[in-house]
Amino acid sequence: MIVVYDGTAEGFLSLVFEVYAHKLSPTHIFKSRPQSLLQIHEVRSDETHARRVLEGMKRTFSPLHVREIQQVLLCDTLAFELPLLAYVNLGFKDPKNLYDPTQESVRTVQNWARVYGRMVHRMKGFVRFEELEEGVFYAKIQTDYNILALLGHHFVERLGAQGFILHDVERGLAFVSQEREIYAVAHADVPQVSEKELTCKGLWQTFFSHVAIQNRTNPKLQQAFVPLKYRTYMSEFEGRYSSTCKH
């Protein structure tokens, strides 16, 4: 059976509810309706159903396994649905199953959760804020998975009352710190940064270029610590030393 849902976490939990309520056996799960003549079961997001499934998981599973499920639900570029559904089924049969590495869905889901957690950890060090003329901090990110909420709450703790905007460019989402909310952003022009920011960025780029010992340059090692895919919005790599500094 082909099952279609809306691609949201609430939609997936509603899907789990219907699998149990209607004894469904999905063979394929899609985030959008495919071109197919086969029978398709469409799941609509239902807040009540999703909450019942989430509460059931919290009562039955360990906090670690609930967190892994929540992390995989944010791996929005993966086709995680069938392995995650199998993982949830295993847990509801017996929570001890989720500690069994011989189960394929256990290995798959827990590996995805580790990758997700590693990405969040790395991005905590790779985000580069710029100060706008209004005094608000602004940073763009580009990541494989949706980590905006976790990253945003991390910087709320780090920056305290300082207002900031964290902009996920690919997904068109922004975390606004003063309200701790995520907003959809259809389009955003590059904001005007302050003069102080331009000076600081220039100084930082100059330091970054001069602190290196040229005859000990090791690009492979550098890429191991800072992979290329994370450098797009890191100021030290921006324009490769096109510094505004007058030194």
Image (tube, helix red, strand yellow):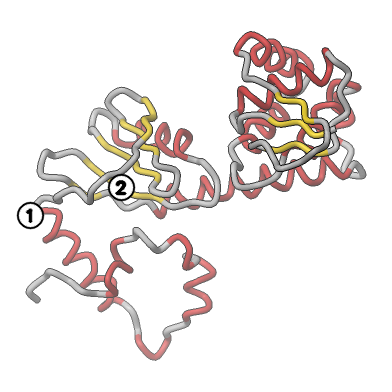
Element type at mark 1:
helix
Tell me what residue is drawn at x 79 percent, y 16 percent: 60
Taking depth in this image into account, of 241 and 47 the one nearest to the observer is 47
Give the number of the disc on residue 195: 1
Neighbours of disc 1 within 10 Å: few (<14), some (14-19), many (20+):
few
The residue sitting at the front extreme is 37
Q: Which residue, given by chain and number where applicable, does mark 2 sit on?
A: 139
Residue 20 on image: x %, y %: 84, 17
Q: Amino acid at mark 1?
A: Glu
Tell me what residue is drawn at x 68 percent, y 34 percent: 68
- Residue 227 position (above or below residue 81): below
Residue 186 on image: x %, y %: 34, 39
Tell me what residue is drawn at x 60 percent, y 47 percent: 77
* Residue 141 appears left or right of 91: left
- Quarter of the image for residue 45 reads top right
- Residue 17 position (above or below residue 64): above
Q: Amino acid at mark 2?
A: Ala
Quadrant where the N terminus lies? top right
